[in-house]
């Protein structure tokens, strides 16, 4: 089997805009989005660099295949590939040239001909990047984007990743969020703004459980305090929370994982179900996010 790695956007000067790009037509393993930039005065942290990209989306004939804000895509990279995204040249020198790369995945493993996005016709599959030029943290960003096609692949399934933004509920306590039905769910990657601090030991999403047709399924009770610790199984480089370390701040994220062994044995199959929900116990009245990672069968 042959793969093709090619450039679909080269040294493009980024502005505050939504940049749309047609993707190649062969089966797609993944995209590599690299943003180059220069430090503005001192070292731009990972959090400051990620702010530059508001969101990344891939659509097929208008239907969403992937939608993520940059922080959530970085966390998805950690979950899938067991390493934090690469942020180069960690120095505080003004005008030092640096790069950040994010992977847009169409399978849980790269270069998997059985789990990738199927072949499409020209103009059907589109990448959109919503960006905002930061005022002070970095200078003169450019995008280089490459695609990895798997020529002749006949995938049986592909990864779909969509972000659910959950509004502040108006009070603390249990909040139910409906999950999509029809595919197998590999993970829910949860984001809380609030994490334990000097005067509090609470997370925004303090605990979660899963219910399928009103029956507890798998996660009868999962506290954020323990779930954050589960990154030990996903981040081989360690989960640190120092902003300048160049790693995702894992304290804000945890994954409700239905593929913990990477063998498909525990995927949550929602096909034929009436209702699948995650019930989050909110310790803080705040908005939250859920990245729903699904495995979609090709052909239904």
Image (spheres, grey):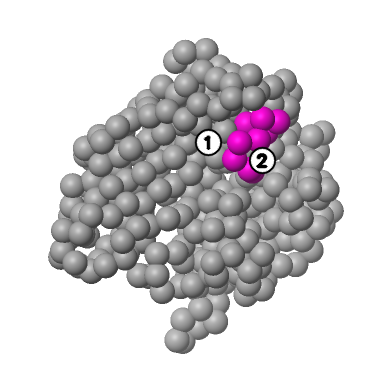
What residue sits 18% from the left and 52% below the top?
A: 139
Q: Is residue 41 left or right of residue 30?
A: left
Numbered tag placed on residue 294 in the rendering: 2
What residue sits 55% from the left and 17% below the top?
A: 120
Picture layout, residue 117 above or below residue 215: above
Other residues around mark 2 within 10 Å, as few (<14) / some (14–19) / many (≥20): many
Picture layout, residue 203 above or below residue 139: below
* Magenta range: 108-116
Provide residue 99's location: percent of width, then percent of height: 32, 52
Numbered tag placed on residue 30 in the rendering: 1
Quarter holding residue 13: top left
Give the structural element (helix, strand or loop) at label 2. Answer: strand
107 magenta-colored: no
What residue sits 40% from the left and 41% below the top?
A: 33
Picture layout, residue 11 above or below residue 137: above
Q: Nearer the viewer, residue 74 or 112?
A: 112
Quarter of the image containing the N terminus?
Answer: top right
């Amino acid at each position: 089997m042959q793969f093709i790695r090619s450039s679909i956007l080269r040294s493009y000067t980024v502005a505050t805009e939504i940049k749309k790009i047609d993707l190649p037509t062969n089966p797609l393993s993944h995209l590599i989005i690299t943003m180059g930039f220069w430090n503005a005065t001192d070292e731009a942290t990972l959090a400051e660099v990620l702010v530059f990209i508001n969101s990344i989306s891939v659509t097929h004939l208008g239907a969403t295949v992937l939608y993520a804000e940059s922080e959530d895509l970085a966390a998805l990279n950690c979950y899938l590939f067991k390493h934090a995204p690469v942020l180069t040249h960690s120095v505080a020198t003004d005008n030092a040239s640096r790069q950040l790369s994010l992977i847009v995945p169409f399978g849980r493993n790269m270069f998997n001909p059985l789990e990738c996005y199927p072949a499409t016709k020209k103009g059907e599959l589109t990448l959109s990047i919503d960006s905002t030029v930061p005022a002070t943290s970095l200078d003169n960003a450019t995008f280089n984007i490459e695609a990895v096609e798997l020529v002749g692949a006949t995938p049986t399934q592909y990864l779909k990743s969509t972000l659910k933004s959950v509004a502040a509920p108006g009070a603390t306590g249990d909040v139910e969020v409906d999950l999509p039905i029809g595919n197998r769910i590999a993970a829910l990657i949860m984001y809380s703004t609030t994490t334990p601090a000097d005067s509090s030991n609470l997370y925004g999403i303090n605990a979660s459980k899963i219910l399928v047709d009103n029956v507890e399924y798998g996660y009868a009770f999962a506290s954020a305090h323990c779930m954050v610790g589960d990154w030990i199984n996903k981040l081989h480089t360690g989960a640190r929370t120092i902003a300048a370390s160049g790693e995702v701040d894992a304290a804000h994220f945890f994954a409700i994982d239905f593929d913990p062994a990477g063998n498909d044995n525990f995927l949550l199959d929602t096909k034929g179900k009436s209702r699948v929900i995650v019930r989050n116990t909110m310790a803080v009245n705040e908005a939250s996010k859920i990245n729903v990672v699904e495995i979609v069968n090709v052909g239904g």
